[in-house]
Amino acid sequence: MNILTPLPPLAALLLYACSQAPQRDSRAARSEVQDTNVAHRLYRIDGVDSLLRAAGVFAPQLWVTLPTYLPQDDVTAIAGRVRDSVAHVHSDLWSIELRFETPGTETRETRQVARFVWGPDGERDLFGKRTAPRRWSSRYNRPTRDSVLASLSNYGHLFGDGRASVVRRLGSPQRVETRVAASGADSVFVLVYRGASFGGSVRNSDRLEMLSTIRLWAPAAGFPSVFSIGGTRQSGLIKMLGAADYGPQTVADSTVLSYQWFGPHSELIEFYVVRDTLRLVRWRFRMG
């Protein structure tokens, strides 16, 4: 397997819709909604607040946790899939509200990505009184600098701290490069995959491994899709992230924009732009 391996096959996602509050219909049975249209681990449903009315109106409110900020078109597609899944089980679905969030951490709260409503004239009609045609309405919150850098940081740390964790995730590399550091105290390694490389060191005194840098130059499964390697322009990067903390610097034929991230981990996340197009993303860990 290499870093360009597609996401696992489409998998079933179970959504449990149930009424909980005392004023809601206590006779409503828990039901399973099976969504076979969503890629494995793309999102998960964290909770459902459904309001069943005597008039036979089913108007659920769902909280959907995304792994990271996704482009508006991707969120729109997920909203349609969830609505279709609920409608497949609940023939009395009248309207639905979806609140998309990114997960919180110890250092930051959850962030609302978007709110989508499908119902009469784009409203969540709890009583079934509206007669307007049902349609989607939405409010999408553009990703902030911190949310984008946090998602990139989280992606980088998915690969762990050493060679073993990288290999467990990606399989055997195409090539392994090793050498002794100039100080003689450490050995340096680079694992080379198709589209990415992972560099680190091994402390000779106790064999402690430490991953220090990741380079990604090709599209990869799980990479935050707010960017497109080979597609995003420099102006788009700056519009989303603001001015670089360091740079821009010129390295060979690349313009390098470096951003410092002080989340649970401190690192530099660098974007290499060639002829106005993003060509490489580099993580440099423990740079604080």
Image: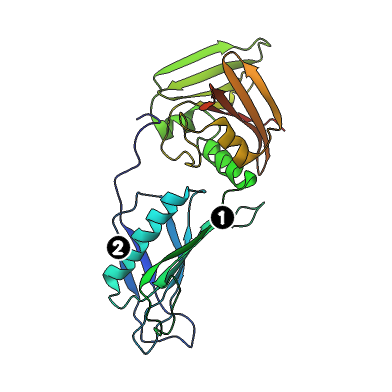
- Read off the residue under disc 1: 141
| Residue type for callout 2 | Gln
Is the N terminus in the top left, top right, bottom left or bottom right quadrant? top left
Q: In the visual, does 172 lie left or right of 156?
A: left
Looking at the rendered image, the quarter that the C terminus falls into is top right
In the image, what residue occupies the spot 35% across and 73% down?
A: 133
Residue 132 lies left or right of residue 180; in this view the side is: left
* Residue in view at x 49 percent, y 41 percent: 224
Q: Is residue 74 left or right of residue 32?
A: right
Mark 1 or 2, nearer chain start: 2
**Residue 210 in the image: x percent, y percent?**
59, 27
Whether residue 63 is visible to the viewer of this picture, yes or no, is no
Element under disc 1: loop
Q: Residue at x 71, y 28 (%)?
A: 246
Q: Which quadrant of the structure image shows residue 75?
A: bottom left
Residue 211 screen position, x and y as percent: 57, 28
Give yes or no for contact between labels 1 and 2 (Cβ–Cβ under 8 Å): no
Tag 1: amino acid: Asn
Q: In the rendering, at what x and y percent does residue 155 appear?
A: 52, 39
Q: Quadrant of residue 85?
A: bottom left
- Residue 34 disc label: 2
Is residue 266 visible in the rendered image? The answer is yes
Q: Nearer the viewer, residue 85 or 230?
A: 230
Q: Position of residue 60 (x, y in %)?
A: 42, 74
Number of the front mark, 1 or 2: 1
Q: Is 104 on the left-hand or right-hand side of 52?
A: right
